[in-house]
């Protein structure tokens, strides 16, 4: 970006003006959601302010537009950041890092590097074959899908930055610890043999992106992600709103509270087969916390739903032999359970 | 005659890229063969880190995303000029 031609500079200026206008419109919309939802439920629909139905409807009418606005805005911002972190650049940053430091770096880069589970295998091969240690590679492969932007944005929007921050912290902990343990187990021979035999045809030259490219790509991912998850979000919030209005506080404390020691492993086990509804599960899980489920148990459940998925196992089976695949899942599950206990104990 | 390869193990995005590419090629009326590469050893030979990838005459032109029809048209035009 050092030598901008006058033409590019002026088109950049126009781009930033448009972006600024969009940001202002977004902020205005975000701030009228609450009064609008109250007005709709209590004046237009005439529901009583402290009735179960009134509370549920107001909660729903407030949360749906708020969350969809947040999702669009933040996915856009995150996608812009991600255009600066291609997988190739991440690989270069991780090269030469030792275990330990490497695991921490890999988990952090897992948050910002664009990732789709269908690319898990090329990423895995690209990392391992360029000499990045197996455990460091796994730290990345655990963090990238688990600390997923939709989950974090939803947690932030529905329950505030503390819960979102805790989720990121626990995802990082699991990724670093599990990756480190897998690295120590020295399981390189359980990687499929073809992975070590791939011959590359020279290096990929990195693309030069202009700001217009970045904005266009970010807008593309907003359309893709919001288009894919909005229905789950609406359904999830509807169920959450129902629980919010009708289920009494602390109703779940005895089953999902911190006294019930078995609730953490049970939550993780139940979470493994659940996969595709990550977007819908956040509002429900969060509402469970409100009603007395302990935070550690709820976060463990979420991580298990999002981070431990059977479809991903099927994809990784192409490059991992059975013992390593099973170890991979077992170590993550154990790390999630420990993190769940840790948060139940600390908070 | 161009050889265009779509790299990807068969996920939804790879199929979409293949469809867009075929459409562009037929609209441009270019003589080109569109091939799908689905085996990982073959995909990884192109040194890409995310799928789907698009390769024209053995040169990687994009990876990890679905370029727009307009972009693919540019890729094809460029390839025709250098061929």
Image (cartoon, grey):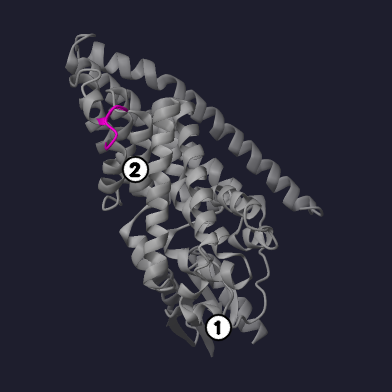
Residue under label 2: A279
Span colored in magenta: A256-262
Query: Would residue A189 be counted in the magenta stretch?
Result: no
Residue under label 1: A197
**For this rendering, which residue is in front, A263 or A68?**
A263
Circle on res. A252: none
Q: Tags 2 and 1 in contact by the CB under 8 Å rule?
A: no
* Residue A34 percent across, percent down from the top left: 38, 18
Task: Using the rendered view, name the quadrant where residue A190 is placed.
Answer: bottom left
Label 2 element class: helix
Q: Is residue A309 left or right of residue A167?
A: left
Q: Nearer the viewer, mark 2 or mark 1?
A: 1
Q: Is residue A288 above or below residue B73?
A: above
Task: Using the rendered view, name the quadrant where residue A341 is placed.
Answer: top left
Dominant secondary-structure state across the stretch colored magenta: loop
Q: Is residue A201 visible?
A: yes
The image quadrant where one finds the C terminus of chain A is top left
Identified at 37% across, 61% down, the residue is A312
């Amino acid at each position: 970006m050092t030598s901008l031609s006058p033409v590019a500079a002026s088109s950049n200026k126009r781009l930033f003006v448009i972006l600024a206008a969009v940001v202002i419109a977004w902020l205005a919309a975000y701030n009228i959601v609450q009064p609008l939802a109250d007005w709709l439920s209590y004046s237009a629909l005439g529901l009583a302010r402290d009735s179960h139905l009134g509370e549920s409807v107001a909660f729903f009418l407030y949360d749906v537009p708020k969350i969809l606005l947040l999702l669009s805005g933040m996915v856009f911002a995150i996608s812009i950041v991600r255009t600066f972190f291609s997988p190739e650049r991440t690989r270069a940053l991780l090269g030469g890092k030792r275990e330990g430091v490497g695991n921490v770096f890999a988990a952090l880069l897992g948050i910002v590097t664009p990732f789709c589970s269908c690319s898990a295998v090329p990423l895995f091969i690209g990392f391992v074959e360029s000499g990045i240690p197996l455990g460091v590679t796994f730290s990345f492969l655990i963090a990238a899908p688990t600390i997923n932007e939709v989950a974090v944005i939803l947690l932030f929007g529905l329950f505030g930055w503390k819960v979102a921050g805790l989720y990121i912290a626990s995802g990082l902990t699991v990724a670093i610890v599990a990756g480190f343990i897998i690295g120590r187990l020295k399981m390189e021979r359980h990687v499929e043999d073809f992975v070590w035999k791939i011959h590359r045809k020279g290096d990929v030259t990195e693309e030069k992106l202009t700001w217009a490219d970045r904005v266009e790509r970010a807008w593309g991912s907003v359309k893709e992600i919001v288009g894919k998850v909005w229905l789950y979000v609406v359904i999830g919030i509807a169920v959450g709103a129902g629980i919010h209005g009708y289920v009494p506080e602390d109703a779940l404390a005895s089953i999902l509270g911190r006294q019930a020691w078995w609730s953490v492993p049970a939550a993780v086990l139940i979470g493994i087969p659940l996969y595709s509804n990550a977007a819908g599960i956040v509002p429900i899980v969060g509402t469970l916390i409100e009603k007395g489920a302990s935070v550690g148990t709820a976060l463990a459940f979420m991580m298990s739903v999002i981070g431990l998925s059977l479809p991903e196992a099927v994809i990784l089976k192409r490059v991992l032999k059975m013992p390593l695949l099973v170890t991979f899942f077992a170590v993550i599950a154990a790390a999630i359970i420990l993190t769940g206990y840790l948060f139940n104990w600390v908070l | 005659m161009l050889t265009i390869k779509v790299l990807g193990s068969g996920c939804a995005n790879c199929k979409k890229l293949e469809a867009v590419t075929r459409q562009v090629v037929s609209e441009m009326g270019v003589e080109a063969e569109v091939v799908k590469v689905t085996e990982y050893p073959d995909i990884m030979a192109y040194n890409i880190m995310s799928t789907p990838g698009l390769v024209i005459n053995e040169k990687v032109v994009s990876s990890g995303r679905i370029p727009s029809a307009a972009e693919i048209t540019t890729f094809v035009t460029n390839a025709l000029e250098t061929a």
